[in-house]
Image (cartoon, rainbow, N blue to C red):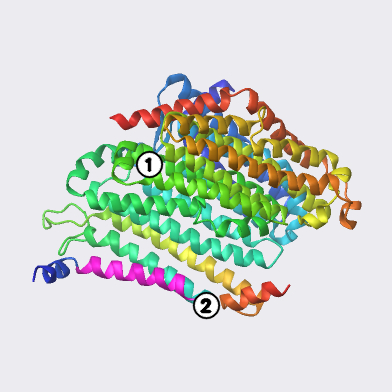
Amino acid sequence: MEALERFATHYNYVVTVFLMLSGLFIVIARGNLVKKLIGLGLFQTSVYLLYLTPAKILGGTPPIYDHHFKVYSNPLPHVLMLTAIVVGVATLALGLALVVRISEAYGTIEEDEIFEKDGQE
Amino acid sequence: MIAMLESVGPHLPILIVIIPLLGSLLVAFTRSGNLAWLIASLSVLPLPVAAVLMTMSVLRTGQPLVYEMGNWPAPYGIVYKVDALSGFVLCVVAAIAAVIMPFARKSVATEIPSHQQSWFYALYLLCLCGLLGIVITGDAFNAFVFLEISSLSSYALIALGRHRRALLAAYQYLIMGTIGATLYVIGVGLLYLTTGSLNFDDLAVRLAEADKTYHASLMAALGFMVVGICLKIALFPLHVWLPNAYAYAPSFATTFLAGTATKVALYLLIRVLFSVFGVAMVYDRLPISDVLVVLSVAAMFIASVSAIFENNAKRMLAYSSLAQIGYITLGIGLANIHGLTGALVHIANHAVIKTALFLALGAVVYRIGSAHYSDMAGLGRRMPLTMGAVVIAGLGLMGTPGTAGFISKWYLALGAIDAGLWSVVFLIVASSLLSVIYVGRLTEVIFFREPSPRAMAARDPPLSMLVPLYVLAAATIYLGFDTRATAEIAATAAGFLVGGLTR
């Protein structure tokens, strides 16, 4: 019962860790360069949840001072993750651009086939 | 003039980051490689002056320089902070970046297609901006942003190499580097959740209180941050991205990254372990010291052996870099004043020595278009000035007395003795002998073999390449005798770092 309660109260963290691990697993286990980038994106995205989960308060508003509202969410993690999202987009774009160039140069985006082609030289 | 200096003086901490950033924007708008090189040089040259001025002022007053962004004081706003440690690393990075600039023009002109040259310089300046930013910032998340600025631009720099393997090397570095940076940011997130602060100094104060309630989270944060940074450092066994990235990147990019990028990551590791967590907290709870020492020794030996059997000079030097990184992390792992002094001195000395060696290889690639041993055979007679510098820097790499490399190994050995690890002293000497073999093999190839067909046509590179090479070769010798600039500042910084532990 206690375990179930912990799960229910830490639901977001469970999802975060699951996303984190599955993202990392895809990066390591898949040989397809695009799939690796998808895994990497998942891994980075899970971090957004890690930061935002404790920052968002249910019913909380943005911290704009007004006597109608008493509960505010913490804005700092939101701002930090905005930056992290930009970084993630840039990384994904650069990664995909590299995959396009690799596909042009090697004619494949499967890791083992690429190593095979380089080995033949 | 003096009035102008006085008005600029307080803003040096931000200028050192802003100048390369704006420079890269300007460069991105140019279309001619020469013009791009000129603007890049003009924006890089003031940086070492600024770094030295700031470091001197810190050492004179004994107080860190603190620059508050938008006048927001420390825990609330982002501050840039220069103390003995960051000033020292700033000087190393800015000086290396400035010294290699004359070399860039001809090397980049031959290796990079003309329509990409201005982009190349823009990426170089962005990367430099990110590296300087990591060192100067006093904010953990800001450091992550700068880390990504420098990393993203270095992935693109590596991908500009001529061989198609450069693309794959850049891709692998992108995957590993992003995982490393994400692990770091997870650690920062956990720290923020438990302490509510991102400022390095403020974190250090609040950790003691948070440790009572959130001990497990803090240890997890420490683990995430250390592993993430070690991926960037390329500490064995997280090093697989480095040899290919260095071997296939354009010569100028390799030279720059080898001298600066890993050094800045090492700085971040020292900052996190010593300034934020403090050694007492780090080394008593988690066996980080033991892990670092064991991995460092493994790096020193395994990478050195790989370097001995390598036939591509650029890859050989990349493996040797991994071994030298092992020396630096060894000093960090020893965590006493001598060990840490050795680590810091080696950050500077290895930057000088390895940059000199990669510059020489850049000159070789400029002349014969290859850095394979089979093509470099007999180059000693055709490019005597370049190869003379290789020998000087090679002696430094081995740690011969009278060169810079000896000073750092001396302090490391002292640190190991202080820590009571006599076997490590022996291992430092033994791994230096391995470096004698790989440097010796390079020397044998370039001096004692019949010249290859490519080497027959070669001659010494133009003066713009020789001057930076000899400046660094001279520094290798000079820093072996006059240790005021390196060991004394490093000892001051190490004293602060280790002294801060007993608070």
For the C terminus of chain B, the quadrant is top left
Residue at the extreme left: A1
Q: Which residue is mark 1?
A: B273
Q: Disc 2 marks which amino acid? A: Asn
Total marks shown come to: 2
Q: Secondary structure at mark 1?
A: helix
Q: Which residues are magenta?
A: A11-32
Q: Position of residue B205 (x, y in %)?
A: 26, 36
Along the horizontal axis of the image, is B297 left or right of B210? Answer: right
Q: Secondary structure at mark 2?
A: loop
Q: Residues within 10 Å of mark 2 (few under 14, many from 20)?
A: some
User: Is residue B26 shown to the viewer in this render?
Assistant: no
Q: Residue at x 59, y 43 (%)?
A: B431
Q: Position of residue B419 (x, y in %)?
A: 42, 33
Quarter residue A12 falls in: bottom left
Q: Position of residue B57 (x, y in %)?
A: 48, 23
Give the label on residue A32, or none.
2
User: Is residue B466 shown to the viewer in this render?
Assistant: yes
Residue B162 vs B451, above or below: the answer is: below
Q: B159 or B436, which is in the foreground?
A: B436
Give the label on residue B146, or none.
none
Residue B446 vs A69, above or below: the answer is: above
Q: Chain of mark 1?
A: B
A15 in magenta: yes
A43 in magenta: no
